Image (spheres, rainbow, N blue to C red):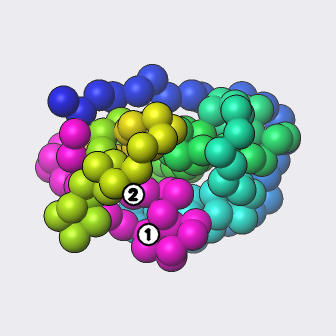
Amino acid sequence: MIEERKTFKVLDSKLITYIESSASNKNLFTITSIVDTTNKLTNKKLQFTFSRCDINPNQLIHTQSTNCVGYSHFYASICNFLIEKTEISNHWRAKVYVGELYFFGVNVHAYVDSSFFKNHDIVVLENRITGEKIHIDPTISDYFWIDRVTGLHN
């Protein structure tokens, strides 16, 4: 079963400054422009690690190393921060979900023995009015330049 994770609110002044200085409000009119901006901000700031790390975006702005959970939380927090600054704030919301990663229909977790790869986190942006969903895998985006994925399996 897919599990939704609690998201973090952007509170850290360094994170707020990073977002606001990097994202011009005049360019954030659509969910597509917000997604593209959030991809750039996340990919620029974070680096993947297998080590123990924080997942709270308010800490990650300082440490900058995290796993797929931290990538997803950082992405969703920035995305929601930007959404709140636009006229689409009543329509869209970014949420973090945990499940399993599939590549061309094959569950990649079956080929890895490490408990580190037990699950995988992604972000789902959902339009609360239309039900439209956009699936984003910030970790895959950073390393393989694949900005959108087709869904999440569990």
Q: Name the residue under label 2.
A: 136
- Asked if one can make out residue 10 in the rendered structure from this viewpoint, the answer is no
In-image side of 109 versus 145 (left or right): left
Residue depicted at 79% across the width and 59% down the height:
21
x and y, in percent, of residue 80 in the image: 50, 42
The magenta-colored residue range is 129-154
| Rendered view: 106 above or below 62 | below
Identity of the amino acid at label 2?
Answer: Ile
- Mark 1 — residue? 147
Residue 149 image-quadrant placement? bottom left
Left or right of 100, for residue 31: right
Helix, strand, or loop for circle 1? loop
Query: As shown in the figure, which amino acid type bears the numbered disc 1?
Result: Asp
Point out the image quarter for the N terminus.
Answer: top left
Neighbour tally class for label 1: few under 14, some 14-19, many 20 plus, Cα within 10 Å = some
Which quadrant of the figure contains the C terminus? Answer: top left
Q: Are marks 2 and 1 in contact (CB under 8 Å)?
A: yes
Please report the residue visible at 21 percent of the width from the left and 46 percent of the height from the top.
Answer: 153
Give the number of callouts: 2
Q: In this view, does 126 lie to the left or right of 35?
A: left
Is residue 134 inside the magenta stretch?
Answer: yes
Q: Answer whether residue 136 is visible to the viewer in this image.
A: yes
Residue located at (48% from left, 63% from top): 140
Q: In this view, does 59 lie above or below 108?
A: above
Image position, residue 45 (x, y; %):
74, 57
Q: Residue furthest front?
A: 113
* Nearest the eye: 69 or 102: 102
Is residue 141 one of those drawn in magenta? Answer: yes
Identify the mark at residue 25; answer none if there is no mark. none
